[in-house]
């Protein structure tokens, strides 16, 4: 008896959904083909001048590539890919989902009904929902994001998308601050991408005056940042030279730090707590301090299979470091969330810790201290660097 051709069933359902206008997305995963950095492929329907097309987005580790196909070519490509290179696929339509899995010659297809979904727009060149829409600003040119023609450079598209996403996240958080105007301190500002973008958006689009100070150790970047702020007419934006711990953050309403390496993230959190900032937001980078303690071999022996491989040890160190940071923030009166703020296709350092002061200090303090102690004992950790700072 010939086994059913589940790939053909999936492609028939895809073709019908495409024709009916009910296709939301087809995603292929579990790739094991010859292209080393290819992660997945997503397919949707778009309308072009030449007619409706299947739009394939090939998602690589550091980039996306889009190709549009007519139906025959699209279905042939999908059939070949599902038969040889992709182990799974999910078809999402307005009325149902189909989950395909392949294990060698065995194929499985599972259908799940759905209700209340709307099909996405098929307009190919629809305007992107970005906070920053004007690309000819002086600061964009000065920071190398835009060319002299006022268009975002091809090699800066990912960076510009990332900055827009950060503004999309940070602007509502800052809008909730009560001070007028609020003071935002960016620890380890670098070239100040986020500072310029936030100031521009809040001052010119939202019409919310703010004061932003970028703290940066490298004097040339500070000088360049101040010159660009002046040329842009951003009177409330300035940069100061120095280390995170040297800066006086008193009066800061928000303390932020993006990709401050290892314990520099803890320095920024400590400065925010000490200043009584209403908002602390950090995107950590590197987690060496805790990893060194875990490598010393004091963790619970039952964790050995999880920690014997370097890549797993690294990921565990990241998770534990940031978990302890979140708990220590809760211990000092902050409601804390941790989430991915940009896709890992753009940067692997993509977790954001957001802490908002809500007066919970003292509430469940014993329980939080107990959780911290248990985690440290389990993984053989002596003390988190942020603990040391807070105990001073």
Image (spheres, rainbow, N blue to C red):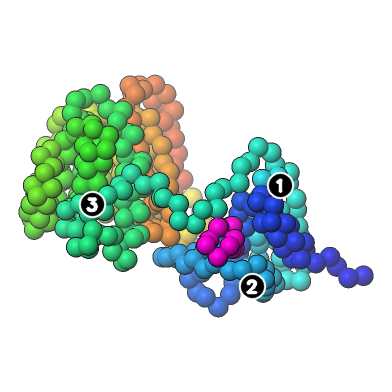
Q: Which mark is residue 96?
A: 1
Q: CA distance from mark 1 to mark 2?
A: 25 Å
Query: Which residue is farthest front?
Result: 49
**The magenta stretch spans residue 284:** no
- Specify the segment rendered in magenta: 39-54
* Location of residue 228 with respect to 118 vertically, above or below: below
Q: Is residue 277 left or right of residue 242?
A: right
| Residue at left offset 52%, top offset 75% | 35
Measuring from the top left, give residue 151's x and y in whole percent.
27, 60
Q: Is residue 181 left or right of residue 125?
A: left
| Residue at left offset 51%, top offset 53% | 123
Helix, strand or loop at label 2? It is helix
Helix, strand or loop at label 3? It is helix
Could you say which quadrant of the image residue 12 lies in? bottom right
Q: Quadrant of the C terminus?
A: top left
Could you say which quadrant of the image residue 349 lies in? bottom left
Q: Considering only order in the chain, which callout, 2 or 1, is on the residue closer to the N terminus?
A: 2
Q: Considering only order in the chain, which callout, 1 or 3, is on the residue closer to the N terminus?
A: 1
Can you identify the residue that label 3 sits on? 193
Q: CA distance from mark 3 to mark 1?
A: 42 Å
Measuring from the top left, give residue 82's x and y in whole percent.
67, 69
Label 3 CA crowd tier, 10 Å (few <14, some 14–19, many 20+): some
| Residue at left offset 38%, top offset 25% | 365
| Residue at left offset 85%, top offset 67% | 3
Helix, strand or loop at label 1? It is strand
Q: Quadrant of the N terminus?
A: bottom right
User: What predominant SS class does the magenta segment belong to?
Assistant: strand
* Location of residue 33 with respect to 386 vertically, above or below: below
Residue 101 visible in the current orientation: yes
Can you identify the residue that label 2 sits on? 73
Q: Nearer the viewer, mark 3 or mark 1?
A: 1
């Amino acid at each position: 008896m010939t086994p059913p051709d589940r790939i053909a069933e999936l492609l028939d359902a895809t073709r019908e959904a495409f024709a009916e206008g009910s296709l939301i997305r087809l995603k292929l995963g579990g790739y094991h083909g010859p292209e080393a950095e290819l992660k997945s492929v997503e397919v949707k329907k778009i309308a072009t001048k030449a007619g409706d097309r299947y739009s394939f987005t090939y998602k690589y580790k550091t980039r996306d590539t889009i190709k549009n196909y007519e139906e025959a070519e699209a279905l042939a490509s999908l059939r070949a890919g599902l038969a040889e290179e992709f182990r799974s696929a999910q078809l999402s339509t307005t009325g149902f989902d189909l989950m395909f899995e392949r294990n060698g010659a065995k194929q499985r297809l599972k259908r799940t009904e759905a209700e209340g979904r709307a099909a996405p727009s098929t307009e190919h060149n629809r305007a992107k929902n970005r906070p920053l829409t004007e690309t000819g600003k002086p600061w964009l040119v000065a920071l190398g994001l835009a060319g002299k023609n006022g268009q975002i450079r091809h090699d800066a598209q990912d960076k510009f998308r990332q900055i827009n996403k950060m503004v999309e996240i940070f602007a509502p958080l800052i809008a909730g601050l009560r001070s007028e105007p609020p003071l935002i301190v960016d620890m380890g500002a670098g070239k100040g991408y986020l500072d310029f973008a936030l100031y521009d958006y809040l001052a010119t689009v939202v019409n919310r005056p703010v004061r932003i100070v970028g703290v940066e150790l490298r004097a040339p970047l500070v000088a360049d940042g101040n010159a660009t702020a002046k040329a842009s007419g951003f009177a409330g934006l300035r940069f100061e030279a120095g280390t995170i711990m040297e800066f006086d953050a008193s009066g800061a309403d928000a303390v932020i730090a993006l990709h401050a390496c290892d314990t520099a993230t803890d320095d920024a959190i400590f400065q925010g707590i000490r200043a009584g900032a209403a908002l602390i937001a950090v995107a950590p980078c590197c987690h060496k301090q805790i990893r060194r303690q875990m490598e010393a071999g004091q963790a619970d022996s039952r964790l050995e299979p999880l920690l014997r491989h370097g890549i797993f040890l690294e990921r565990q160190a990241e998770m534990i470091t940031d978990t302890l940071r979140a708990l220590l923030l809760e211990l000092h009166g902050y409601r804390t969330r941790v989430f991915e703020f940009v896709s890992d296709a753009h940067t692997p350092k993509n977790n954001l810790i957001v802490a908002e002061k809500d007066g919970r200090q003292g509430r469940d303090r014993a329980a939080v201290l107990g959780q911290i102690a248990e985690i440290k004992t389990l993984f053989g950790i002596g003390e988190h660097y942020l603990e040391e700072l807070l105990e001073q």
